[in-house]
Amino acid sequence: MATNVANRPTLSASVGPKASKSALSQAVVNRTLASCDSTLAAAAIAVTPADRFIYAHLAAVRAAGAYLKLIGVPTANRGAFRSVWERLAAASPEMSLWAAYFAAGTKTRIAIEAGESVSESDCDEMLGLAEDFRDEVVAAARALGPPSRQQLTSLTYGYASAA
Protein backbone atom coordinates (compact mmCIF):
# COMPACT_ATOMS: atom_id res chain seq x y z
CA MET A 1 0.00 0.00 0.00
CA ALA A 2 1.19 3.47 -0.82
CA THR A 3 0.33 6.41 1.40
CA ASN A 4 -0.70 9.89 0.44
CA VAL A 5 0.13 13.20 2.10
CA ALA A 6 -2.44 12.67 4.84
CA ASN A 7 -0.83 9.29 5.70
CA ARG A 8 -3.94 7.46 4.59
CA PRO A 9 -3.40 4.26 2.64
CA THR A 10 -4.30 4.32 -1.02
CA LEU A 11 -5.13 1.44 -3.30
CA SER A 12 -2.12 0.11 -5.13
CA ALA A 13 -3.47 -2.90 -6.95
CA SER A 14 -6.17 -5.49 -6.76
CA VAL A 15 -6.70 -9.08 -7.63
CA GLY A 16 -9.91 -11.03 -7.58
CA PRO A 17 -12.65 -12.29 -9.83
CA LYS A 18 -14.36 -8.93 -10.40
CA ALA A 19 -11.37 -6.69 -9.84
CA SER A 20 -9.71 -4.87 -12.68
CA LYS A 21 -6.14 -6.05 -13.09
CA SER A 22 -4.69 -3.26 -15.19
CA ALA A 23 -2.23 -0.84 -13.66
CA LEU A 24 -4.02 1.97 -15.48
CA SER A 25 -7.28 1.12 -13.72
CA GLN A 26 -5.49 1.06 -10.39
CA ALA A 27 -3.92 4.43 -11.11
CA VAL A 28 -7.42 5.79 -11.73
CA VAL A 29 -8.60 4.33 -8.42
CA ASN A 30 -5.61 5.87 -6.64
CA ARG A 31 -6.19 9.28 -8.20
CA THR A 32 -9.88 9.13 -7.35
CA LEU A 33 -9.12 8.29 -3.72
CA ALA A 34 -6.51 11.04 -3.56
CA SER A 35 -9.16 13.44 -4.83
CA CYS A 36 -11.54 12.05 -2.21
CA ASP A 37 -8.94 12.75 0.48
CA SER A 38 -8.44 16.32 -0.75
CA THR A 39 -12.16 16.89 -0.74
CA LEU A 40 -12.48 15.48 2.78
CA ALA A 41 -9.73 17.87 3.89
CA ALA A 42 -11.62 20.77 2.29
CA ALA A 43 -14.77 19.68 4.12
CA ALA A 44 -12.93 19.56 7.43
CA ILE A 45 -11.73 23.16 7.09
CA ALA A 46 -14.81 24.60 5.39
CA VAL A 47 -16.05 27.76 7.06
CA THR A 48 -19.76 27.38 6.38
CA PRO A 49 -21.91 24.36 7.21
CA ALA A 50 -23.20 24.33 3.63
CA ASP A 51 -19.68 24.04 2.21
CA ARG A 52 -18.77 21.34 4.75
CA PHE A 53 -21.81 19.25 3.76
CA ILE A 54 -21.27 19.71 0.02
CA TYR A 55 -17.56 18.81 0.17
CA ALA A 56 -18.20 15.80 2.42
CA HIS A 57 -20.90 14.48 0.10
CA LEU A 58 -18.70 15.00 -2.95
CA ALA A 59 -15.92 13.05 -1.22
CA ALA A 60 -18.34 10.16 -0.73
CA VAL A 61 -19.26 10.29 -4.43
CA ARG A 62 -15.57 10.03 -5.28
CA ALA A 63 -15.05 7.10 -2.90
CA ALA A 64 -18.02 5.32 -4.50
CA GLY A 65 -16.53 5.93 -7.93
CA ALA A 66 -13.22 4.46 -6.79
CA TYR A 67 -14.99 1.41 -5.39
CA LEU A 68 -16.95 0.85 -8.59
CA LYS A 69 -13.74 1.09 -10.60
CA LEU A 70 -12.03 -1.27 -8.16
CA ILE A 71 -14.63 -4.00 -8.67
CA GLY A 72 -14.76 -3.45 -12.41
CA VAL A 73 -18.15 -1.77 -12.84
CA PRO A 74 -18.21 0.31 -16.05
CA THR A 75 -18.46 4.05 -15.57
CA ALA A 76 -21.32 4.49 -18.02
CA ASN A 77 -23.92 2.28 -19.58
CA ARG A 78 -25.89 2.86 -22.69
CA GLY A 79 -29.48 3.52 -21.75
CA ALA A 80 -31.07 5.05 -18.71
CA PHE A 81 -29.06 7.22 -16.34
CA ARG A 82 -28.22 5.57 -13.02
CA SER A 83 -26.62 7.46 -10.17
CA VAL A 84 -23.43 6.26 -8.56
CA TRP A 85 -25.55 5.22 -5.57
CA GLU A 86 -27.89 3.09 -7.70
CA ARG A 87 -24.92 1.46 -9.41
CA LEU A 88 -23.17 0.87 -6.07
CA ALA A 89 -26.21 -0.82 -4.52
CA ALA A 90 -26.77 -2.97 -7.61
CA ALA A 91 -23.14 -4.01 -8.00
CA SER A 92 -22.35 -4.58 -4.34
CA PRO A 93 -25.29 -5.38 -2.03
CA GLU A 94 -23.03 -5.15 1.03
CA MET A 95 -22.68 -1.44 0.23
CA SER A 96 -26.43 -0.83 -0.09
CA LEU A 97 -26.78 0.91 3.30
CA TRP A 98 -24.03 3.35 2.35
CA ALA A 99 -25.68 3.89 -1.02
CA ALA A 100 -29.06 4.61 0.59
CA TYR A 101 -27.58 7.07 3.08
CA PHE A 102 -25.60 9.03 0.52
CA ALA A 103 -28.45 8.94 -2.02
CA ALA A 104 -30.59 10.71 0.57
CA GLY A 105 -27.69 13.13 1.07
CA THR A 106 -27.86 13.99 -2.62
CA LYS A 107 -31.30 15.51 -2.11
CA THR A 108 -30.00 17.53 0.82
CA ARG A 109 -26.98 18.68 -1.17
CA ILE A 110 -29.23 19.86 -4.01
CA ALA A 111 -31.37 21.78 -1.51
CA ILE A 112 -28.27 23.39 0.01
CA GLU A 113 -27.01 24.39 -3.44
CA ALA A 114 -30.43 25.99 -4.01
CA GLY A 115 -29.94 28.14 -0.91
CA GLU A 116 -31.47 26.13 1.94
CA SER A 117 -29.61 25.96 5.23
CA VAL A 118 -28.23 22.85 6.90
CA SER A 119 -27.52 22.19 10.57
CA GLU A 120 -24.05 21.80 12.02
CA SER A 121 -24.96 18.33 13.28
CA ASP A 122 -26.07 17.21 9.80
CA CYS A 123 -22.77 18.48 8.38
CA ASP A 124 -20.73 16.75 11.04
CA GLU A 125 -22.62 13.50 10.45
CA MET A 126 -22.09 13.69 6.69
CA LEU A 127 -18.37 14.38 7.12
CA GLY A 128 -17.87 11.57 9.62
CA LEU A 129 -19.75 9.04 7.52
CA ALA A 130 -17.97 10.12 4.33
CA GLU A 131 -14.67 9.46 6.10
CA ASP A 132 -15.91 6.08 7.34
CA PHE A 133 -17.12 5.16 3.84
CA ARG A 134 -13.76 6.10 2.34
CA ASP A 135 -12.05 3.90 4.91
CA GLU A 136 -14.37 1.01 4.03
CA VAL A 137 -13.48 1.36 0.35
CA VAL A 138 -9.80 1.10 1.26
CA ALA A 139 -10.52 -1.94 3.46
CA ALA A 140 -12.34 -3.59 0.55
CA ALA A 141 -9.32 -2.97 -1.64
CA ARG A 142 -7.03 -4.56 0.93
CA ALA A 143 -9.28 -7.61 1.02
CA LEU A 144 -8.73 -8.09 -2.71
CA GLY A 145 -5.07 -8.80 -2.09
CA PRO A 146 -1.66 -7.20 -2.03
CA PRO A 147 -0.12 -5.57 -5.10
CA SER A 148 2.72 -7.14 -7.01
CA ARG A 149 6.09 -5.42 -6.65
CA GLN A 150 5.92 -4.13 -10.23
CA GLN A 151 2.39 -2.71 -9.76
CA LEU A 152 3.36 -1.08 -6.48
CA THR A 153 6.43 0.57 -8.02
CA SER A 154 4.43 1.71 -11.03
CA LEU A 155 1.59 3.17 -9.01
CA THR A 156 3.62 4.65 -6.18
CA TYR A 157 5.81 6.67 -8.49
CA GLY A 158 3.23 7.27 -11.21
CA TYR A 159 5.08 5.58 -14.06
CA ALA A 160 5.70 2.09 -15.33
CA SER A 161 8.82 0.46 -14.01
CA ALA A 162 11.66 -0.37 -16.38
CA ALA A 163 11.67 -4.05 -15.35
Image (cartoon, rainbow, N blue to C red):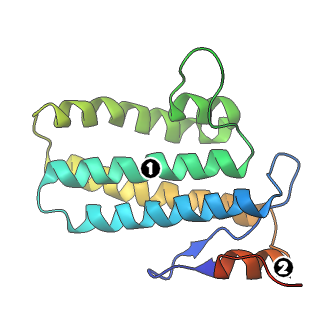
| Residue plotted at (62% across, 58% down) | 28
Residue 1 in sight in this render:
no
Residue 150 numbered mark, or none = 2
Location of residue 37 in the rendering, given as x and y in whole percent from the top left corner: 43, 66
Location of residue 66 in the rendering, given as x and y in whole percent from the top left corner: 59, 52
The quadrant in which residue 147 appears is bottom right
Q: Earlier in the sequence, mark 2 or mark 1?
A: 1
Eyeballing the image, is 154 above or below 43? below
Q: Exactly how many numbered labels are in the figure?
A: 2
Quadrant (top left, top right, bottom left, bottom right) of the N terminus = bottom right
Horizontally, residue 112 falls left or right of residue 56, namely: left
Horizontally, residue 58 falls left or right of residue 10, namely: left
Residue 122 numbered mark, or none = none
Residue 158 or 134: which is nearer the viewer? Answer: 158
Q: CA distance from mark 2 to mark 1?
A: 30 Å
| Residue plotted at (46% across, 82% down) | 5
Location of residue 142 in the rendering, given as x and y in whole percent from the top left corner: 72, 66
Horizontally, residue 100 falls left or right of residue 55, namely: right
Residue 89 in sight in this render:
yes
Eyeballing the image, is 59 above or below 87? below
Residue 60 numbered mark, or none = 1
Question: Amino acid type of disc 1?
Answer: Ala
Residue 149 or 1: which is nearer the viewer? Answer: 149
